[in-house]
Image (spheres, grey):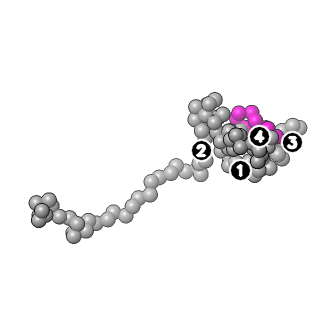
Amino acid sequence: MVKKKYDTLWPEAKKRCRLNEADVKMAKELGLTPKSLLKNIHGPNQKWKAPVKLWIREMYEDKFGKVLSIHNGEPKQPKRQAEKQPDPFYDIDEEDLPF
């Protein structure tokens, strides 16, 4: 029963706290509830409070030693640049320089 109650509150917490999927997953692994996240949103008079997103990441890093990131399911591969053929104008040996 309690599980269903929290399932309906997570989207609201995600929206109001500006969290992504990885942040929500970290919060759940830390045992935080959506209500606790909503209570920790800083107000205009609470400038000393860190944003909820950073607060979750700091706690997760302290406990597990790393921060989760978002993956699309496929590993990122560096973009290959088209092999440029050297410009003959710039291909001058040092011996050919006049100075």
By secondary structure, the bulk of the magenta-drawn segment is best described as helix
Q: Nearer the viewer, mark 1 or mark 2?
A: 1
Q: Which residues are magenta?
A: 28-36
Q: Residue at x 79, y 43 (%)?
A: 38
Rounded to the nearest whole Å, what is the CA distance between mark 1 and mark 2?
A: 15 Å
**Mark 3 or mark 2, which has the lower sequence index?**
3
What type is the residue that disc 4 sits on?
Answer: Asn
Residue with the mark numbered 3 = 5
What type is the residue that disc 3 sits on?
Answer: Lys
**Mark 4 or mark 2, which has the lower sequence index?**
4
**Mark 3 or mark 1, which has the lower sequence index?**
3
Q: Residue at x 22, y 66 (%)?
A: 90
**Mark 1 or mark 4, which has the lower sequence index?**
1
What type is the residue that disc 1 sits on?
Answer: Arg
Q: Secondary structure at mark 1?
A: loop
Residue with the mark numbered 1 = 18
In the rendered view, tell whether residue 78 sits above or below residue 3: below
Residue with the mark numbered 4 = 40
| 32 in magenta | yes
Is the C-beta separation of discs 3 and 1 under 8 Å?
A: no
